[in-house]
Image (cartoon, grey):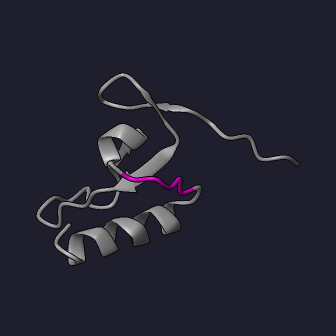
Amino acid sequence: MSEERTFLQCKCGGKAINCWVLRDYNDESKGRWHYHKCLRCQNEGKHYFTLEESEAAWNKKVNNGG
């Protein structure tokens, strides 16, 4: 079974394959919202193909004050 890369639509209308997980801990739906951002909007040069990789990168970025 081959895994196919799916292209999602970014808020800006571009193509995004990354899934950055933004969590609002004051919201009951925390962890359920996925905000798909294209490379331009992320200002990031890497693709993350799993939620875990993406979340780890996002958390690192946030924790580093970036």
Query: Which quadrant holds residue 40?
Result: top left
Magenta span dominant secondary structure: loop
The reply, left or right, for residue 27 in relation to residue 57 is: left
Q: Residue at 53% across / 53% down in the picture?
A: 47
- On the image, the x and y values in percent for residue 34 come to 37, 48
Q: How many labels does the image show?
A: 0
In-front residue for pair 22/58: 58
Query: Which quadrant holds residue 14?
Result: top left
| Quarter of the figure that contains the C terminus | bottom left
Work out whether residue 37 can be spotted.
no
- As displayed, is residue 41 above or below residue 19? above
- The residue range painted magenta reads 44-48
- On the image, the x and y values in percent for residue 38 come to 41, 38
Tell me if residue 45 is in the magenta stretch. yes
The reply, left or right, for residue 54 in relation to residue 11 is: right
The reply, left or right, for residue 47 in relation to residue 14 is: right
- As displayed, is residue 65 above or below residue 9? below
In-front residue for pair 25/47: 47
- As displayed, is residue 37 above or below residue 15? below
- On the image, the x and y values in percent for residue 60 come to 32, 75
Work out whether residue 34 can be spotted.
yes
- On the image, the x and y values in percent for residue 17 come to 52, 41
Q: Residue at 84% across / 46% down in the picture?
A: 2
Tell me if residue 9 is in the magenta stretch. no
Q: Residue at 25% across / 61% down in the picture?
A: 23
Farthest residue in the right direction?
Answer: 1
Farthest residue in the left direction?
Answer: 26
